[in-house]
Image (tube, grey):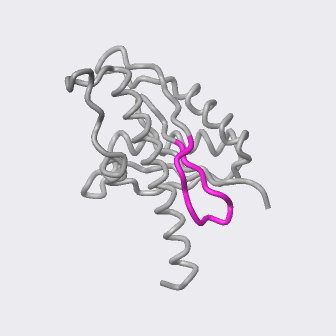
Amino acid sequence: MSGAILGIDVGRRRIGVAIADLDGLAARPLETITLARPRSSDDSGGDPVRAIAAVVELARRHDARELVVGLPLDMSGAEGEMALGARTFADGLRAALGVPVSLRDERLSSSIAESRVGAMPRGRSGGAPSRTQRDRYRARVDREAAAIILQDELDARRARAAGR
């Protein structure tokens, strides 16, 4: 059976995307969708309609049969503004694609991703990194976070199937 499962790490500036085959063994980073930069602290950045359209296009290109969207809960487990945004985004994907879309707790996924990716590169002569270097690094971390979210879901499913 062809097709894939996509993992989605939704952010204000970028959306990290990971992929796994339908056998659900291993997730791997796929792509980062860059949204418009926020113009002010009140601006959330990207246009949600454009963001959903970009993920839909990617899902269709990879014959995605299911999506797993990261749910950014507070450390206490409470849902804040970002969790509400992730739920709304997942609902938009579900409506646009007509495939199952589940939510997965993503607490600590970004910090785990940063530890996997390593330190941000330094700029010229050891100085501060350039904007381009920072953007590339953040995009890589977002892809890795999406892979962590998806792998956590795949592992949980295997554990449930094994009766653990």
| 120 falls in the magenta region | no
Image height check: is 18 above or below 136?
Answer: below
- Residue that lies at the very extreme toward the bottom in this rendered image: 163
The residue furthest right is 1
Q: Which residues are magenta?
A: 17-30
Question: Along the horizontal axis of the image, is 150 left or right of 96?
Answer: left
Seen in the picture, residue 73 relative to 26 is either above or below; the reply is above
Write the residue at 52% across / 45% down.
8
Q: Quadrant of residue 54?
A: top right
Along the viewing direction, whichever of 74 and 158 lies nearer the viewer: 158
Residue 19 highlighted magenta (yes or no)? yes
Could you say where residue 143 lies in the image, as x and y percent from the top left?
47, 43
> 92 or 139, which lies in front?
139
In the current view of this chain or complex, which residue is farthest to the front? 125
Q: Residue at x 37, y 34 (%)?
A: 137
Residue 122 percent across, percent down from the top left: 26, 29
Counting from the top left corner in percent of width and height, residue 40 is at: 31, 16
Look at 54% across and 65% down and name the residue there.
154
